[in-house]
Every structure is written in C-alpha cells, then in structure tokens.
Image (cartoon, rainbow, N blue to C red):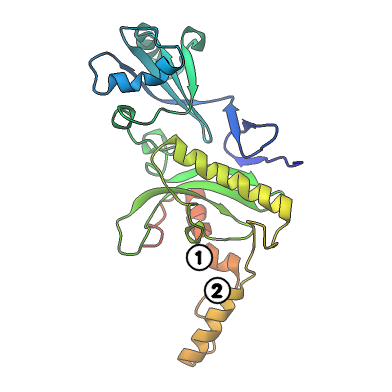
Amino acid sequence: MGITITNTYGTAHQVSETNPAHVTSCDRYRLPLVGAIVPGNPGYEDMVEILKDNGHDTRPEGYGLIFLESEEFSATYFGSIAQIEQYKRDNADGTATFDASQGVMYAQWPHGKGWDDFLPRTFWNVAARGGIADGVGLVTGFAHTEIPGAEVIVFEFEGKWLPDSEPQQLVTYHCTGCHLDTFHDCGHVHENTGPDSRRWAARQARQHLISAHRHGVGDTNSACRPNNGEMLRAVNAAAREMWGTTGNALPDTDDAYCATKGPCSIIRELRAGVRPPVYRA
C-alpha cells in the first residue's frame, strides 16, 4: 500500500504487512488488572470455554489472570494462581515482570458470559495515575501523511449523544487536516468501555489516513474531505440576512470554528491538562 503511519503521541505498534490499520502487537504494555478465577465462581465454566476450545484448559484449580493493554492493543494472560500471587507480591513497587512462557496468552480481553460481569470498565487515562480524570485525555496520535503539520488524534472525553441526554464516557478520533466532526459520521464515536473501544477508534484513525493516502485529500471517495468553510459561510450569510447584521454569527473557517466549538477545542484543553466541558452539552 506504500504508506507508513507515524506516531506523534503514544506508543508505536506493530501492524500487518498488508494492512497498516490492523495492529498486531506492541512492545510495551500496561497491566491494569490482575486477578484469578476458580471453579465455583459465577460464570466460571463459560469463562474457561476459550481455553477448552484451544486445548489450554489444563488447570483444574483455576487460573491466575493478567490483563495487558496498550493504546491500540490488548491481551490476556492465563497462568497458575501461584504465579500470579507471586507477581502481585513482587510488584508492590510497580516494577515486577512475569514469565509469559509459564502460561498462555490470548489477543484482546475476553467478552461474553461471565467475563462481562467480571471485568470492570477501564480507561486509558486514569486520575489515579496522573490523568485529568478517568476517561478524559489523549490516547494516541498520528502524523497526517498528506497534510504537513496535521494529525489524526485519538482521545477519550465526556460527551452527549443528544443535548438532553446524560453525559457519557466516549472515545473517538479527530483529523486536524479536515476538521470533520465524527459525531456526524455514524459509527465513529464509541462508548468508552475498555480496550476494544479504544482499539476501534485508533483503527478508524488509521483508516482515515489510509483513505487520504489512497484517494487524496478532498476527493469524493476520500474520508478526509475539508469543507473549506463552505457550510459556515452559508450559515453566516443566512444569519446576516435574517437578523440584518453585518458581522458573522460563527467563525468563517473550519479550523477557527473547530478551535472554539469543535473537537479541536477539546484536544487543546486535553493537551493543556485541563478537563474540557462536556461536548455537545
């Protein structure tokens, strides 16, 4: 495909040789959750089904678990309970490592019966680790391949699906080259429930860049299509005629509007370490 996607923020990841939107692994992970499951736990039989299907259900006493996460990838380690208990003791200062060869590793965190009740909701940005607030902050960012100086940024934020709805923890991406608001693009704003939500947002950010590279910026087939202020100028003209004024009701360029009322206003606050207002409130 002839495109190299470079990080401007966050950790670089390994990708498929044929699809640079498909992340396959990462060199460095965060270990946000450690635990164990044993026979008798609610949903245990359903939870170990993944191991049975792959011939890995070899510990009748149960399993120690380590959940790994990076900005764009996640994995689950199944080992012995004794190994995980030792890891927890060794990790009192947060510097311990574990020997993954003693168990089995699966890509992503499990989902489904048993797991959905077992796993808590997690965020990449966490207040206890110095974040602005839980689920509020930058996740990763990529340099735009076709617009020098522009980025496509993945971020967690608080927003509303509708003005009269309750605020939600959300994750999406934003291109500072075209300034299109992903709220207007169905399926590009996600409820921020865990690593999979952030992985999909980052994948869509990568796909945005691939589309711009393949079709060009502004092409009708491209995901990256700047409006060049056309809609804003139309709204301002209608407002001037309706109200009999000479000034503009809104900024007349996409970058100026985005910087004050759009996703760029959120990203600016996040970069400054400030909690932005709820978006679309």
The N terminus: image quadrant: top right
69 up-or-down from 241: above or below: above
Q: Check disc 1: other Cα within 10 Å, few if <14, some if 14-19, many if 20+.
A: some
Q: Check disc 2: other Cα within 10 Å, few if <14, some if 14-19, many if 20+.
A: some
Is 211 displayed left or right of 78 in the figure? right
Q: Position of residue 228 (x, y in %)?
A: 64, 69
In this orientation, which residue lies closer to the viewer: 107 or 81?
107
| Residue at the (64%, 57%) spot, across then down | 224
7 up-or-down from 31: above or below: below
Within the image, what quadrant is residue 6 found in?
A: top right
Three-letter residue code for mark 1: Thr
Residue placed under numbered mark 2 in the picture: 251
Whether label 1 touches label 2, CB < 8 Å: yes
In this orientation, which residue lies closer to the viewer: 98 or 198?
198
For the residues labelled 1 and 2, the Cα–Cα distance comes to: 9 Å
Three-letter residue code for mark 2: Pro
Q: Position of residue 229 (x, y in %)?
A: 61, 72
Which secondary structure, mark 2?
loop
Q: Is residue 97 visible?
A: no
| Residue at the (64%, 64%) spot, across then down | 226
